[in-house]
Structure formats: structure tokens, C-alpha cells
Image (cartoon, rainbow, N blue to C red):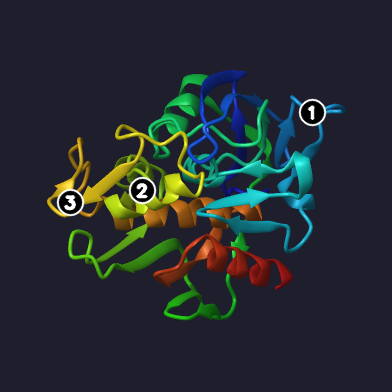
Amino acid sequence: MTSGPKQRTIAKSVSVEGLGLQTGGKVRLTLKSSPADSGITFVRTDLPDKPSLNLRLLALGSSDAVERRTTLGFGPGQIQTTEHLLAALSGLSIDNIAVELDNTELPGLDGSAKSFVDLIKSSGVVEQEKARNSLKVGRVTACSAKDSLIAVFPDEQFRISYTLSYKDPAIGTQFYSIIVNEKDFETEIAPARTFCLEEEARELLKRGLGKGANYDNTLVIGKAGPVNTALRFPNEPVRHKILDLIGDLYILGMPIMGHVVAIKSGHALNAELVKKLREG
Ligand SMILES: [Zn+2]
């Protein structure tokens, strides 16, 4: 008999509607419970034959960081901006779930993982019969690119230490370290919103990105501080980078027992680490 944690799913179907942060596309997202050992499956209900993508079966290298978001799969069936929902699923220890959407990009909602946490909790979380799998990090694994780095060290817990550094003094250098458990994820990480500098916001819109972004779901930081909003935490940006990282790591479909140390790591480098961890 194993007394370790059990796998979890949600109690009943729940839905939410919103706009994709980058594409601005209207989307309805429905979460449904899934049997033990089935993992996390995304389903595109708007396409013929409703193509699905299970994280366990995801081919190596087919998660990619395109234009400031994490995209899963290839071609017309791809799923964009998965990181905030996946962070919520990781934070609440949901192993098995079906994620249905009728457009290519997940809804941005409030720009953090809080709305997804609330949605999952409105359904209820239920334990299943099977024991939970986890990836125990046995040796140091690292990836780096230009001035960014990500490494994972063996640890008894799931811990993240992140350093963010912007030339712009409005954001500057921020460091935050947290042992990721359900309670602290909910209060310290989940509410941290997507952010960008005011000049980046203008540039992104010119490139056709950020179409669903507004001052409610994106923390825009100008010379004099946040524009049209107040910070939810003094170091909200570094907390959001940790949120993104938790979501990107959950593409593994199971929790990591390890200490992830990251310096200026974004979706592309996070994906590289996931690939290395999958390859063992
Ligand atoms: Zn994000």
C-alpha cells in the first residue's frame, strides 16, 4: 500500500469565456474531469474531428515558445498561451483533466492564474484511486542562452528561485524564491499578472500581438510605475515569471521534485529544460 499523494481531477465540467491575450480571439474554455492515469488533454472543439493533444504523448520538441507565449502542437490544431492554465493545474495538483477550447488561444481572463484557480475550485477537486507520479530530479540539469540561464538541482521539494533583470529601472532587478505548495501558490504566485513595459506594449500591438490585452489583464509599467492599475505585489513581475515557469514545467504532466534556479529565463529556455528533463 502506498500512502503517498493520490492523483486528482475536477468534480464537474466548468466553462469560462474570454479573449486570447495575444490574438484577441473570443474563446470558450471548458474543463472536464478525466480518469486516473489519463493525464492532461487539450481538445480543439472548433475543428473538424476535434483534434486532441495529450501532454504525455506530446512529441519531444513540439512545445515551443513563439512570440511571448507557449504554444503546443503544430499547424491549425495548435494551442496557444497554455502557461497560465497549466500553472493553475500544477498549483492545485490536478493530474487528469480534459481542456476543451473552440479557438486557438486560451482566454487571458485577468492575465494571471487566479481566474483559472477560481474556475477549478468552483468545480471542486477530487482525489482518484491511483498514486501520483512525480519527476524526482537526480542530477543537475541546465540550459543557457545569451544572458539567461535555467538549472534544476535535486531537492526534496518543488522550489523555484528566479532572478529577473530589466535595464529599465521601473522594473529593475527582482529576486524571489518559493517552495511551491498549494497554499502559497494560490496566495503568492497565482494572482501575479502578465506585465510589459509601456514602450513594449506599443511595439507588440504594432506586430499584431497583445490584441486581447488591456489595463485590467496586463500590468503595463511606465516610467512613473504601473499605468491605470495598482501592483498586486511590489515584485509582481518576478512572481509572474515564476507563474509562467511553473506552467511551462507542467508540460511534463507531473510535479518536479527539484530546485529550479532561473535567471531571466523565458518560454523558449523553459521549453528547452522540459525537453532535457523528458529525455532524462
Ligand atoms: Zn505569463
Numbered label tally = 3
Q: Is residue 263 above or below residue 109?
A: below
Asked which quadrant contains residue 242, the reply is: bottom left
On the image, the x and y values in percent for residue 193 come to 34, 43
Q: Is residue 262 left or right of residue 270?
A: left
Which part of the image, by quadrant, shows the C terminus? Answer: bottom right
Check disc 3 and report the residue beneath it: 234
Label 2: state its secondary structure: helix
Label 3: state its secondary structure: loop
Of tags 3 and 1, the one toward the viewer is 1
On the image, the x and y values in percent for residue 267 come to 53, 60
Residue at (57% x, 19% y) in the render: 14
Label 1: state its secondary structure: loop
Q: Can I make out residue 97 in this image?
A: yes
Q: Nearer the viewer, residue 241 or 1?
A: 241
Label 1 to label 2: alpha-carbon separation = 31 Å
Q: Amino acid at mark 1?
A: Leu
Check disc 2 and report the residue beneath it: 201
Residues under numbered marks 1 and 2 in contact, where contact means CB atoms less than 8 Å apart: no
Mark earlier in primary sequence (1, 2):
1
